[in-house]
Image (cartoon, grey):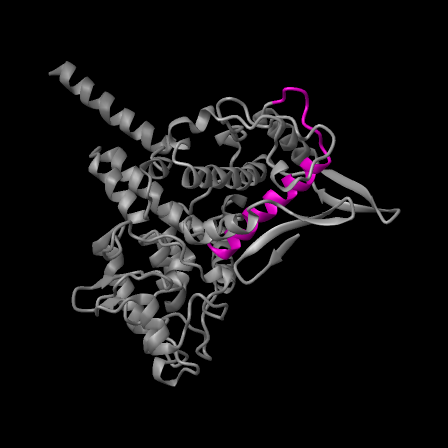
């Protein structure tokens, strides 16, 4: 179970009729929040994954000379087919832990959460002993597993769980042709905007035309819009980023509105988390088509703020500066935006006689649309600077995250082939 304390969350469970806690789990929770800057929702997901693995490991002995990747692979199979752990507590058999069969994509996320804990313990070793910098991957913990530090052992769990070179099991390979479409086709984006009300249109433009995550879009304030230059900025409410008026965002929210973003409140719910900076560096948002979508944004903004149901900041109670509100002045949340988005997709599907391809799309599909659209532009105009621009626009700290989108569609590849072969044929005739 996850146990909350003043400093963070730790992982505990009953073992041999005693409550035991996973070593350093509370520090890992703090590390995920402060160093990795993950949302509360992501942190809980990671910790639940580690909790599941830890409890399973207490009742699953390590095999003779079994490497850690092999041990993890065994656990991965347990996740795939499901498992139930039963133990006796006070002479009664109870279910300690259980897991229903998981899909490969879900299992990959589980393993990523587990590995995060081990990456953290490695980093802690680097902090506590500078000598580990030189031989981190050569160190051996003879006759120990990751459980031994808290003196919880069962059967052969005391065998070495890490090999000479620290290695983790690779994720399942998932066939691309089996994955459902992950982005809204660009040719349907305008149709979505046309049928949407001004508030939703603004949100869709931020997510699709500017690549914002929904949590980032919903944190747009009235003071992040530069009307003179027609620029839009997105600042993390927990950050020290300076707005266009020179105010540090976190301090400004606390001093002007008494909103403390480090305390649980209605502005700090799981679906309003900002997560990472966008763009990558402090600058206004990029537009996938500035001439088309930027004017559309400012037109929709005027329409939205002039509508009778819009509540201006000075009459909101309690007062807050965020742009997207309900009729009562309360914050708009991701779940209600998703409901309207799904409704619009159903209409688009009916109007275009489409199959079920759009059924599973969420708001994040608009961000994916931005990445794929940039890749299609790159296919037609191969300038490597476009990839770097896309990285900055989407806020990717690693270019590899951007390259995922640069797998152009089969239709585009065929069009390029036709154009190139036509050019070659024309030269041969000449």
Image x and y of residue 344, in percent: 47, 58
The answer to whether residue 54 is magenta is: yes
Image x and y of residue 67, in percent: 59, 23
Q: Count the marks.
A: 0
Residue 81's quadrant in the figure?
Answer: top right
* Left/right of residue 1 with respect to residue 413 in the rendered view: right
Task: Give the vertical position of 72 relative to 266 (above or below).
Answer: above
Q: Which residue is drawn at 37% across and 60% down?
A: 217
* Left/right of residue 167 with respect to residue 153 in the rendered view: left
In this view of the protein, can residue 233 be seen by the observer? yes
**Segment tinted magenta in the rendering:** 39-66
The answer to whether residue 243 is magenta is: no
- Depth check: give the residue in front, 283 or 51: 51
Image x and y of residue 103, in percent: 61, 37
In this view of the protein, can residue 221 be seen by the observer? no
Q: Quadrant of the C terminus?
A: top left
* Left/right of residue 102 with respect to residue 419 in the rendered view: right
Task: Give the vertical position of 78 relative to 13 (above or below).
Answer: above
Image x and y of residue 183, in percent: 43, 45
Q: Residue at x 54, y 40 (%)?
A: 109
Task: Give the vertical position of 141 relative to 103 (above or below).
Answer: above
Residue furthest right as drawn: 91
Prevalent SS, magenta region: helix
Residue furthest top as drawn: 428
- Depth check: give the residue in front, 108 or 122: 122
Q: Which residue is drawn at 35% across and 80% down?
A: 313
Task: Give the vertical position of 194 relative to 410 (above or below).
Answer: below
């Amino acid at each position: 179970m996850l146990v909350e304390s003043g400093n963070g969350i730790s992982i505990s469970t009953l073992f041999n009729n005693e409550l035991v806690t996973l070593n350093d789990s509370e520090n890992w929770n703090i590390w995920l929040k402060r160093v990795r800057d993950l949302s509360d929702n992501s942190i809980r997901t990671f910790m639940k994954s580690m909790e599941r693995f830890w409890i399973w490991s207490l009742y699953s002995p390590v095999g003779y000379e079994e490497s850690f990747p092999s041990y993890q692979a065994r656990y991965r199979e347990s996740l795939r087919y499901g498992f139930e752990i039963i133990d006796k507590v006070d002479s009664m058999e109870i279910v300690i832990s259980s897991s229903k069969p998981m899909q490969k994509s879900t299992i990959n996320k589980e393993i990523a959460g587990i590995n995060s804990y081990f990456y953290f313990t490695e980093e802690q070793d680097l902090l506590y002993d500078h000598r580990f910098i030189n031989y981190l991957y050569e160190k051996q913990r003879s006759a120990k597993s990751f459980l031994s530090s808290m003196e919880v052992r069962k059967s052969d769990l005391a065998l070495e769980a890490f090999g000479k070179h620290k290695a983790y099991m690779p994720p399942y390979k998932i066939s691309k042709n089996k994955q459902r479409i992950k982005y809204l086709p660009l040719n349907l984006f305008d149709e979505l905007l046309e049928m949407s009300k001004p508030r939703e249109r603004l949100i869709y433009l931020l997510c699709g035309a500017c690549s914002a995550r929904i949590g980032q879009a919903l944190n747009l304030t009235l003071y992040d819009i530069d009307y003179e230059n027609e620029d839009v900025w997105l600042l993390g409410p927990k950050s020290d980023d300076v707005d266009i008026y020179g105010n540090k965002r976190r301090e400004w929210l606390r001093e002007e509105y008494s909103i403390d973003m480090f305390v649980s409140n209605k502005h700090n719910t799981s679906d309003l988390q900002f997560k990472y900076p966008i763009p990558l560096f402090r600058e206004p948002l990029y537009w996938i088509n500035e001439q088309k979508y930027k004017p559309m944004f400012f037109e929709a903004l005027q329409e939205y703020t002039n509508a009778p149901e819009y509540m201006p900041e000075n009459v909101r109670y309690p007062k807050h500066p965020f742009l997207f509100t309900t009729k009562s002045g309360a914050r708009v949340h991701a779940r209600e935006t998703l409901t309207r988005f799904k409704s619009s997709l159903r209409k688009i599907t009916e109007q275009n006689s489409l199959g079920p391809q759009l059924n599973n799309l969420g708001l994040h599909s608009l961000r994916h649309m931005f990445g794929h659209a940039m890749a299609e532009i790159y296919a037609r105009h191969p300038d490597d600077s476009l990839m770097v621009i896309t990285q900055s626009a989407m806020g990717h700290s690693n270019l590899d995250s951007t390259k995922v989108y640069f797998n152009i569609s089969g239709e585009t590849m065929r069009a390029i082939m036709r154009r190139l072969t036509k050019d070659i044929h024309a030269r041969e005739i000449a």
